[in-house]
Image: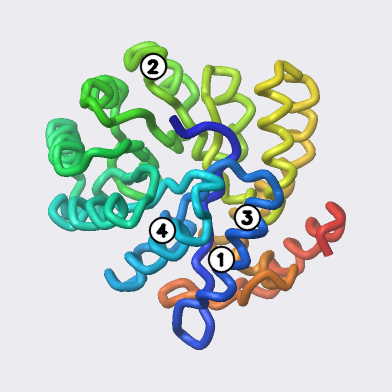
């Protein structure tokens, strides 16, 4: 359903407001670079500090700008099930191709609560849903047995896995079945997860080098795994740099250095530290990005 190189799209700001011109530019750039799926309003898109109106507008604008040339997988997760339902219904109504829903954060729901949350959202819409497991952000780990239960819901089609545990991801693949798509949510593990049967990656680094990630996927999908692995290994220093500080501080800083958008973020996120910015610039120069 959702395959290939997918970008966890940043949300550009200018003077405290959504920068629609920069966002439209980024959509066009990604399409020209071969990105397969646009993923707005995830963690990298600073969804936690967007107003509901801004959240809706970002998804609507990205969907309109894409014009069905690539798919849009809209981030619509929340720690409130009713809120997640509202945002997911909105994404469906404006033409997004599916929704990516992070596990409810802070609440620390039990596994049964996680299943009931996804069941409620899935029953409220008619388009595909992708689960998103990132325990480092949410303080809850969705276990393989729970993923397998969710996979039985008719419109739950896959999971973005950022648990960091390849053994757990293997178990998800085994229990959920071959029709259930696994996507890498951890750039440093992109190649490993593809090797485990993953069908793509939702990438932070793809904001900066979309063509490289698209090429890596195309090679892997064509069976040229050695060449795909070589690109993955070349990108490891940049993957690492994207997490010198809390995401999306480094990626927005990188895009600003490239002239793609401002490095403006919303508190409590703040500008990148001086030393880390120097380290980031060094890596980018070594990779020919500056």
Q: Residue at x 50, y 48 (%)?
A: 68
Instruction: Give residue 128's quadrant in the image.
Output: top left
Q: Earlier in the sequence, mark 1 or mark 4?
A: 4
Disc on res. 41: 4
Residue behind mark 2: 179
For the residues labelled 1 and 3, the Cα–Cα distance comes to 12 Å
Q: Earlier in the sequence, mark 4 or mark 2?
A: 4
Q: Residue at x 63, y 59 (%)?
A: 28
Task: Give neighbour class at mark 3: few <14, some 14-19, many 20+ (Cα, 10 Å).
Answer: many
Q: Nearer the viewer, residue 58 or 97?
A: 97
Q: Which x, y percent locates residue 10?
A: 53, 62
> Given the current orientation, which residue lies at the most extreme bottom position?
15
Look at discs 1 and 4 and give the one toward the viewer: 4
Figure colour scheme: rainbow
Q: Residue at x 23, y 38 (%)?
A: 126
Q: Earlier in the sequence, mark 1 or mark 2?
A: 2
Task: Give neighbour class at mark 2: few <14, some 14-19, many 20+ (Cα, 10 Å).
Answer: few
Disc on res. 207: 3
For the residues labelled 1 and 4, the Cα–Cα distance comes to 15 Å
Disc on res. 249: 1
Q: Residue at x 41, y 13 (%)?
A: 178
For the residues labelled 4 and 2, the Cα–Cα distance comes to 26 Å
Q: Which x, y percent locates residue 246?
A: 51, 60
Q: Earlier in the sequence, mark 4 or mark 3?
A: 4
For the residues labelled 4 and 3, the Cα–Cα distance comes to 14 Å
Q: Which x, y percent locates residue 24?
A: 56, 67
Q: Is residue 214 left or right of residue 95?
A: right
Q: Which x, y percent locates residue 142?
A: 29, 33
């Amino acid at each position: 359903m959702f395959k290939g190189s997918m970008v966890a799209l940043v949300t550009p700001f200018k003077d405290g407001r959504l920068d629609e011109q920069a966002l439209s530019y980024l959509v066009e750039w990604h399409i020209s670079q071969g990105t397969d799926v646009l993923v707005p309003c995830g963690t990298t898109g600073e969804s936690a500090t967007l107003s509901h109106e801004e959240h809706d507008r970002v998804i609507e604008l990205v969907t309109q700008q894409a014009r069905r040339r690539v798919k849009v997988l809209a981030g619509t997760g929340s720690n409130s099930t009713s809120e997640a339902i509202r945002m997911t219904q909105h994404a469906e109504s404006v033409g997004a191709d599916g929704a990516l829903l992070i596990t409810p954060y802070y609440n620390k729901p039990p596994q049964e609560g996680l299943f009931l949350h996804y069941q409620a959202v899935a029953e409220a819409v008619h388009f595909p849903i992708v689960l998103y497991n990132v325990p480092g952000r949410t303080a809850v780990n969705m276990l393989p047995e729970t993923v397998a239960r969710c996979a039985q819901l008719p419109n739950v089609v896959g999971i973005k896995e950022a648990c960091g545990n390849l053994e757990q991801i293997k178990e998800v693949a085994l229990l959920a079945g071959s029709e259930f798509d696994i996507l890498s949510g951890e750039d440093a593990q992109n190649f490993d997860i593809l090797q485990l049967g993953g069908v793509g990656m939702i990438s932070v680094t793809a904001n900066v080098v979309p063509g490289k990630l698209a090429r890596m996927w195309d090679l892997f999908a064509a069976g040229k795994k050695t060449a795909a692995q070589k690109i993955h290994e070349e990108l490891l220093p940049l993957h690492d740099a994207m997490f010198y500080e809390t995401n999306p501080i480094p990626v927005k800083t990188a895009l600003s250095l490239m002239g793609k958008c401002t490095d403006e973020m919303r508190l409590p996120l703040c500008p990148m530290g001086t030393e880390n910015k120097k380290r980031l610039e060094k890596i980018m120069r070594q990779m020919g990005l500056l």
